[in-house]
Image (cartoon, grey):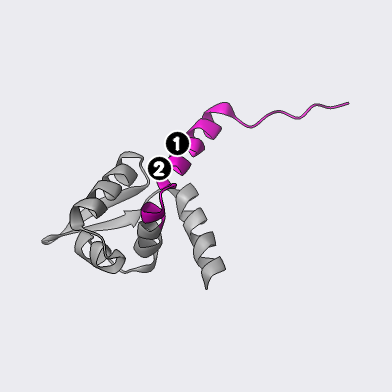
Amino acid sequence: METKVPCNKELITEYSSKLKAVGHPIRLRLLCLIAREDDPCVSNLWQCLKQPQPVISQHLAILKKAGIVNAEIQKTRRVYSICDPFIKEIIQNIQETIS
């Protein structure tokens, strides 16, 4: 009988860490907004989510530290995008089930 090789431990650890980072409802909503909007900046995000700007900035910092989003300076705005393909696919799947 052939035994199956378990999932790659390093990959599972990496995915687990990313899933923990996106596991907060505000962060999931942020990611959905970032994926949907053109050039979303912090002010757009906190206004859409009706949360104080410092709260949104803290959640974005967690996502950025986890390597899930990146920020690009465009004139006077810091614009966010999802840079992690694993999380990007999850957010796309969430958006498809909602629409």
- Pick the front one: 68 or 62: 62
**Amino acid at the residue labelled 2:** Ala
**Amino acid at the residue labelled 1:** Ser
- Please name the residue shown 57% across and 27% down the image: 9
Instruction: Determine which quarter of the picture holds residue 61.
Output: top left
Number of numbered labels in the structure image? 2
Instruction: Determine which quarter of the picture holds residue 75.
Output: bottom left
- Please name the residue shown 50% across and 37% down the image: 16
**Secondary structure of the magenta portion, mostly?**
helix
Q: Is residue 2 magenta?
A: yes
Q: Tell me the quadrant of the picture where the N terminus can be found.
A: top right
The residue identified by callout 2 is 21
Q: Residues within 10 Å of mark 1 (few under 14, many from 20)?
A: few
The residue identified by callout 1 is 17
Q: Is residue 66 left or right of residue 16?
A: left
- State if disc 1 and disc 2 touch (CB < 8 Å): yes
Q: CA distance from mark 2 to mark 1?
A: 6 Å
Q: Is residue 89 left or right of residue 82?
A: right
